[in-house]
Image (cartoon, rainbow, N blue to C red):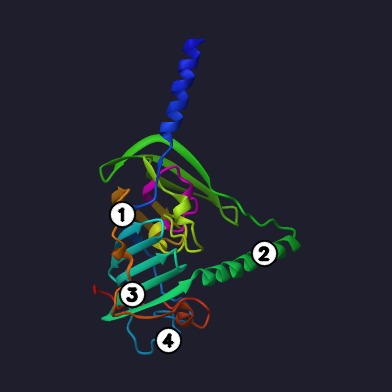
Amino acid sequence: MKKILSVLALFSSGMLMAQPKLVKSAIIKMKTEITFPENFTPGGPGGGPGGGGGGEGMSFTMPRDMETNSTMYYTPDFMKTESLSDFGNNVVIVDRVNKKTTTLIEAMGRKTGFFSTDADAEAQRARQDSMRNLRRDSLAALGLTFRDNKPELIYSDETKKVSGVVCKKVTIKSIGQGGQVSENVVWYNPEFKIDPNSTKASANPGGFGGGRGGGMMMGGGIAGLDLIEGFPMEYEMTRGNGFKIHMTVLKAQPDANIDAKTFEIPKGFDIKPASSMQGEGGGMRMIFRNGGKP
C-alpha cells in the first residue's frame, strides 16, 4: 500500500512539475520569414499599391520573400513590439493602463503613426461578431451548418533544440468552414508561459499568438497558440495559395527587468487616430515601399 501511495505521489509531483511557470514580464527576440504568393499585390484590386486603384504612374515591386527581426517586451501593464524589415521599422505599443494601442511606422524617410483605443477594438469586434452571426443565419436558412470549431492540440514527446533550448512538439489541428483540415507543428518551451491574466487585461491583449499588438509576426494566423502549455519557440504556417510564415525565437528572457521608459512614445512621429487611416473600404491603408532596403 505504501509503495502504491509513493508511486501516486511521484506521479502527482511529476504532473505539477510539468506545468509551465507563468511569467508576467519577458523579452523575446525572434525572426519571421514570410513567403508571399506569386502575383501578390498589396491592397488587392481596386486600391493600394499594385492594386490598380491608385498610385498613378508609380512603379511598385513586391518582393517574393521578406524577413522581419522583432523584439517583444512584456509587462503586466504594457507590451511593445519592435520590428525591422525590408519595408522599414514598425513599433507597436500596447498600453493596458490607458487602454490604448499606438503603432509607429518609419519608412521612406517618414515617421508616421496611428492609435486606437479599447473602445475602438470593441466596436470592431462587435462588427465582426455581427457579420459572423449574419453568415451563420444565412447558412442556417440554406440548411447548412456554420463551423465554429476550436483548435485541437495534439502533444508529442518528440523534442528539438530551438536556439539552444530543448523544445517539445505540439500539433495544432483545426477545421475550416469548408471542412478542410489544417495542421501546424509548433515547437514550444515547456518551462514558462506568458501569464494570460497579464495579456488579456484589455481589449488589446497582445499576448503571444493572440491579440492585437503583435500582429502577423506573433500568431501568423494560427489559432490556438495561446492555448499551448508553454511558450511557442518555432512554427511554420502554410496556406494553399503559397503564403508561408516561418517564425523562430532567437532568445527568450522570462522574468526580465524592463525599464518603464521602454514603453514611452518617441518624439518626431506624426500620430493620428486610426479612423483617419482607413481606406474607402473601411480597411487600414498600408504603406509599402518600392523594392529595396530602407
The magenta region covers 219-235
Q: Tag 2: Cα neighbours inside 10 Å, few (<14), some, or many (≥20)?
A: few
- SS under mark 3: strand
Q: Give the amino acid at mark 1.
A: Ile
Disc 4 versus disc 2: distance between alpha carbons?
34 Å
- Foreground disc of the pair 2, 3: 3
- Foreground disc of the pair 3, 4: 3
CB contact under 8 Å: marks 4 and 2: no
Q: Which residue is mark 4?
A: 54
Q: Reply above or below: 35 against 11.
A: below
Residue 66 visible in the displayed image: no
Inspect the magenta stretch and tell me whether residue 217 lies in it.
no
Disc 4 versus disc 1: distance between alpha carbons?
40 Å
Q: Which residue is mark 3?
A: 105
First reached walking from the N terminus: tag 4 or tag 2: 4
- SS under mark 1: strand
- Foreground disc of the pair 2, 1: 1
Measured from the top left, where is residue 24 in percent x and y? 39, 50
Q: Reply above or below: 19 against 250.
A: above
Inspect the magenta stretch and tell me whether residue 220 lies in it.
yes
Q: Which residue is mark 1?
A: 27
Measured from the top left, where is residue 260 in percent x and y? 31, 62
- SS under mark 4: loop
- SS under mark 2: helix
